[in-house]
Image (cartoon, coloured by chain):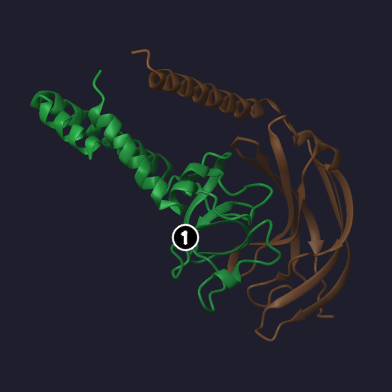
Amino acid sequence: MHSFGYRANALVTFGVTILAVMCAMASISDNLNIPSPTAHVQVMNVNWFQKQPNGNDEVSLTMNVSADLQSMFTWNTKQVFVFLTAEYETPQNSLNQVSLWDAIIPSKERAKFWIHTTNKYRLTDQGSNLRGKEFNLTLHWHVMPKTGKMFADKIVMTGYQLPENYR
Amino acid sequence: MGLFEETMESIKSLPIRDFLTQAINFGMIVVSALMIYRSLMIITGSESPVVVVLSGSMEPGFARGDILLLHMNKDRIRAGDIVVFKVNRREIPIVHRVIQVHERRDTGVVDVLTKGDNNPGDDRPFYAHRQLWLQQNHIVGRAVGFVPYLGWATILLNENPVIKYILIGTLGCVIIFTKD
């Protein structure tokens, strides 16, 4: 009954149980944090706007993105993945989401930022519907924890429009 | 030699009733593990409720050896979701983030493009030849939770089959031959 094996087994079981409880509590404590992020995006320039040889419209934009995501960080936050999508409807598709830019924010100190950037990924439509298209820019974030449940949310910014002609 | 004979002796000397009890205990352990896994499959609606991250393509969010808890519900796939997908010619599922979504108005079919956070480009090179989009049927689950390091055990076991057989053998012997 009191062999080395039994003692080791009891010790390991107890240790793992404590660890599991601590992880669960850390994850639950994330729910107590109610973040209040702000974001602002300005489209500075349409660099080019063309129809690809395969018939899909493609746009290149220059944007100013500023955001304050500091309130998302808790003690259980490993990083925040933040990305900006263009979202619009077309006759064929009820929803199009195209990621334009993303970044990994590793710490609270870097969570208040301003960046002047072109779109990192191509803004390409499925088809040729982008001329004069009104679209939303949405800043999404994905809070990746040290352990436990992941959180995601977004801020939708409306009222952007693409030019009527290719350039 | 000696060990083998002793073992045979101990099997012969076991009363049949004790032996049956041990066999049933052993069966209970195997069956309850299976039951837990199957219940998780039902609850999460995903054919593999947990996956081990095998590559560094989602660093620094997910590292090799971390475990992801998956969930599969009726919610439509949206940009930013971390999905686990299987492409026809590859057996190993890939865990990457959705960066582009196109949902058809008439049929509701969703075309999805994925990318690993740590990879420079999107996943089209990983897809089947000439495949541009993933559809719902390629997607095994959506990651909702995260446990660090826990998957290292399975990675070690899968990459060193010898350790696996030694471990299974030892555990089996311990369960069958311990008397308490």
Q: Which chain is brown?
A: A
- Where residue B167 appears, as percent x and y from the top left, is 37, 40
Residue B156 seen in the current view: yes
Taking the spot 53% from the left edge, 27% from the top edge, the residue there is A20
Looking at the image, residue B60 sits to the left or right of residue B152; the answer is right
Quick one: label 1, few (<14), some, or many (20+) residues within 10 Å?
Answer: few
Q: What amino acid is labelled 1 in the image?
A: Ile
Report the quarter where the C terminus of chain A lies. bottom right
Chain letter for mark 1: B
Compared with A139, B100 (above or below) is below
Q: Quadrant of residue A1?
A: top left
| Number of numbered discs | 1
Residue bearing mark 1: B92
Name the residue at the left extreme.
B16
Q: Which chain is green?
A: B
Residue A131 seen in the current view: no
Name the residue at the front extreme.
B2
Taking the spot 56% from the left edge, 44% from the top edge, the residue there is B66
Q: Quadrant of residue A51?
A: bottom right
- Where residue B91 appears, as percent x and y from the top left, is 43, 63
Looking at the image, residue A108 sits to the left or right of residue A114; the answer is left
- Where residue B149 appears, as percent x and y from the top left, is 57, 40
Taking the spot 53% from the left edge, 75% from the top edge, the residue there is B131
For label 1, the SS is loop
- Where residue A79 appears, as percent x and y from the top left, is 72, 42
In the foreground, B156 or B62: B156
